[in-house]
Image (cartoon, grey):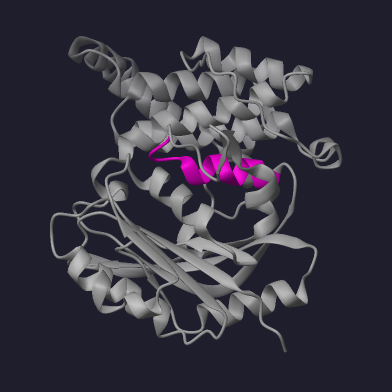
Amino acid sequence: MNLPKITVVTPSFNQGNFIEETIDSILSQEYPNLEYIIIDGKSTDNTVEIIKKYEKHLAYWVSEKDKGQSEAINKGMRKSTGDILTWICSDDLLLENALPNAANHFLENPSVSLIHGKTKTFGEGYSDQITAGYNSDLSIDYFTHMCFPQPSSFFKRNIFEKQSYDVNNHQDLVDESLHYSMDYDLLLRIALNYEIMQVEDVFSAYRLHPESKTVSQQSKFEIEKDKVFLRLLYTLKSNEKAIKGINILKNLGIDSNEQVIYNIDEQIIQSIDIDKIVAMFLYRKIPVAFENKAYQHVIEYCEAIKDNYSNFYNSLNLDSMYQTSKYNSLSAMGKLGWKFKKLI
């Protein structure tokens, strides 16, 4: 069997404590048609020394200043020649047989352009867990957030060729203005145009540590996620349900002046439920706001769903969180009055 060429790109900066494990996890796959590329942002620790130990196994590597992870991913993808592409950050790992298993899924499912599986989260001070993201309804979740672990996803080359941004006469797979939701932005472009398949394989291990963006900069993900979701709604703005969603978000203070419009496959667009997508997007913001004790936002999001998508609101039983937030948002005197009313 002729196995497809797989390109793995590793963006890197000052991850000398972890990158050797990452490199070893990829090379130890012994996948016979591997193209491995490392793009380092001119690390000042021992990263380059480690990369040089493995350079005979690399198709390409460079260590030079860049603007961050998104630019590094783009630089690597532009060097790629693989049939199947992915990126693995320099603190994450591929698990045993990830590459041959991913290749076989594509061979068995030629119409699929993206596959995604599960990941194991791990790290000092964190318990190991297996996750595949949220799976309530993938036909909705693909449009509302990054609903699967990026290190456990692989996509065909046609996505890079057809869905990259054309910037200064070169292709950018991911938007370099995004530093936290570049993968969600890419997912939207894929979901609007191609067939996606979820599989049960645990392809990767995602490391949690104090310096990782997932741990240290979670609030910034929400800001970029809002921005990217609005790109979707503005792409669909010829549909009155999308216009309704835009206006709901504007009333909640979520707005954008961007002019980014995605390419779309009209057949896929006809099959998506825009009302449910907007409602689910707002719903996913509620636990984040609640955890951050932003109770006024919880109230506003709940009321927006209740007023505009009442069936969805009732199906998720949001009243408990809504009432708790209303209580917590009261002044001390207000809380006393609330308790008094309960007594009588």
- Asked if 155 appears above or below 279 in the picture, the reply is below
In magenta segment, residue 88: no
Q: Nearer the viewer, residue 284 or 259?
A: 259
Where does the image place residue 126, in percent across and percent down from the top left?
Answer: 24, 64
The quarter of the picture where residue 276 lies is top right
Q: Nearer the viewer, residue 184 or 287?
A: 184
- Can the viewer see residue 137 in this picture? no
Seen in the image, is 205 located left or right of residue 150? left
Where does the image place residue 185, in percent across and percent down from the top left?
Answer: 55, 39
Q: Nearer the viewer, residue 280 or 159?
A: 159
- Asked if 124 appears above or below 68 in the picture, the reply is below
The quarter of the picture where residue 124 lies is bottom left
Task: Pick out the residue farthest to the left.
Answer: 45
> Can you say which quadrant of the picture contains the N terminus?
bottom right
> Can you say which quadrant of the picture contains the C terminus?
top left
Where does the image place residue 27, in percent across and percent down from the top left?
Answer: 41, 81
Q: Residue at x 20, y 51 (%)?
A: 211
The quarter of the picture where residue 22 lies is bottom left
Where does the image place residue 109, in percent across and percent down from the top left?
Answer: 77, 71
Q: Residue at x 31, y 16 (%)?
A: 338
| Residues drawn in magenta | 178-191
In magenta segment, residue 181: yes
Seen in the image, is 63 located left or right of residue 210? right
Q: Residue at x 67, y 49 (%)?
A: 161
Q: Nearer the viewer, residue 130 or 318?
A: 130
- Asked if 194 appears above or below 103 in the picture, the reply is above
Dominant secondary structure (helix, strand or loop) of the stretch shown in magenta: helix
